[in-house]
Image (cartoon, rainbow, N blue to C red):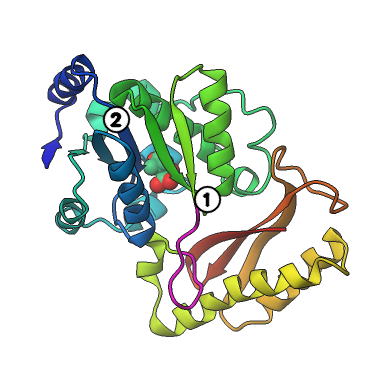
């Protein structure tokens, strides 16, 4: 497995892969890898000649400096995990090489077609601008055949699909299912920050979402929304930031069950912000 920090050396490697007609599977990450990431890597390894994983904690997608600073980092552990999954290349650039001062200071503009004004976009203003900024930069450098993203970040995935269309990238985006711990808790790098007690509390999020599926046949989306929020808020240590049942395509709140919908949630478990979702 090769590890590149230098953008120039990485570009030379990409040119050689392209010249040899190799297909490239790409898994962009911010490190602190868990089974959810490794599932993406496994799929990428099995479907491409070369699997590239980027590890870059992207400063422009964080809303607060303290959240950026608290983001878990363990590069050596990530390297070991990726080696055991037979990843071919790790790309781990430095922030000062990826961005110039102006890019760090000014918000990146992108036409999200309304996908960014709800849910995460409403509570984390500018977050998706930063995501699109870094993913588009990485796509230009890596030039992957396929790129793999987890459905846990459902809104991010919708926005990546939109970005590929708007910016005309010739890349297949592969949507990968949520990977859960035995308790049902969706895998996340942020889970590392939960105490044992908080982990048990956080497991109630997915349990409530799963139970809500069987209630959907006799409750309206609005009634179900209230029920899910009340149930989760009644658990000690959990505070719902939002729960919204939205159309899978437009991400706008639904009033009926006519079109496929997804319930997206963000919950604070103590100081740790967790997200999850469920299809109806
Ligand atoms: O999902 C993530 O970990 C990040 O948003 C991504 C896609 C790696 C961009 O920094």
Q: Is residue 184 magenta?
A: yes
- Which mark is first along the chain, 1 or 2? 2
**Which residue does the numbered mark 1 point to in the structure image?**
151
Quadrant of res 195: bottom left
Q: How many marks?
A: 2
Q: Look at the numbered disc 1 and give the secondary structure of its residue.
A: loop
Magenta extent: 177-186
Give me the disc on residue 75.
Answer: none
- Identity of the residue drawn at 17% across and 26% down: 10
Please give left or right for residue 227 compared with residue 17 in the image: right
**Looking at the figure, which quarter contains the C terminus?**
bottom right
Provide residue 71's location: percent of width, then percent of height: 34, 55
**Quick one: 161 or 16, which is closer to the camera?**
16
Provide residue 142's location: percent of width, then percent of height: 29, 26
Please give left or right for residue 145 compared with residue 126 in the image: left
**Mark 1 Cα-neighbour bin, 10 Å: few <14, some 14–19, many ≥20:** many
**Looking at the figure, which quarter contains the N terminus?**
top left
User: Does residue 100 appear in the picture of this structure?
Assistant: no
């Amino acid at each position: 497995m090769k590890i590149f920090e230098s953008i120039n050396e990485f570009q030379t490697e990409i040119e050689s892969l392209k010249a040899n007609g190799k297909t490239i599977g790409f898994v962009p990450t911010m490190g602190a890898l868990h089974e959810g990431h490794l599932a993406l890597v496994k799929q990428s390894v099995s479907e491409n000649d070369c699997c590239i994983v980027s590890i870059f904690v992207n400063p422009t997608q964080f809303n607060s400096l303290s959240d950026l600073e608290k983001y878990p980092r363990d590069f050596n552990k990530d390297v070991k995990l990726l080696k055991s999954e037979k990843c071919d290349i790790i790309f781990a650039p430095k922030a000062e090489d990826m961005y110039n001062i102006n890019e760090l200071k000014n918000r990146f503009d992108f036409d999200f077609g309304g996908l960014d004004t709800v849910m995460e976009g409403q509570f984390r203003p500018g977050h998706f601008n930063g995501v699109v900024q870094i993913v588009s930069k990485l796509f230009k450098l890596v030039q992957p055949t396929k790129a793999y993203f987890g459905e846990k970040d459902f809104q991010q995935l919708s926005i990546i699909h939109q970005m590929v269309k708007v910016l005309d990238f010739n890349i297949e985006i592969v949507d990968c299912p949520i990977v859960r711990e035995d308790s049902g808790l969706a895998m996340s790098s942020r889970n590392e920050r939960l105490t044992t007690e908080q982990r048990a509390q956080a497991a109630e999020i997915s349990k409530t979402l799963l139970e809500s599926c069987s209630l959907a046949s006799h409750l309206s989306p609005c009634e179900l929304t209230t029920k899910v929020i009340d149930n989760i808020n009644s658990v000690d240590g959990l505070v719902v930031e939002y729960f919204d049942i939205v159309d899978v395509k437009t991400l706008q709140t639904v009033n009926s069950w006519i079109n496929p919908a997804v319930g997206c949630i963000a919950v604070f478990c103590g100081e740790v912000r967790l997200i999850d979702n469920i299809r109806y």
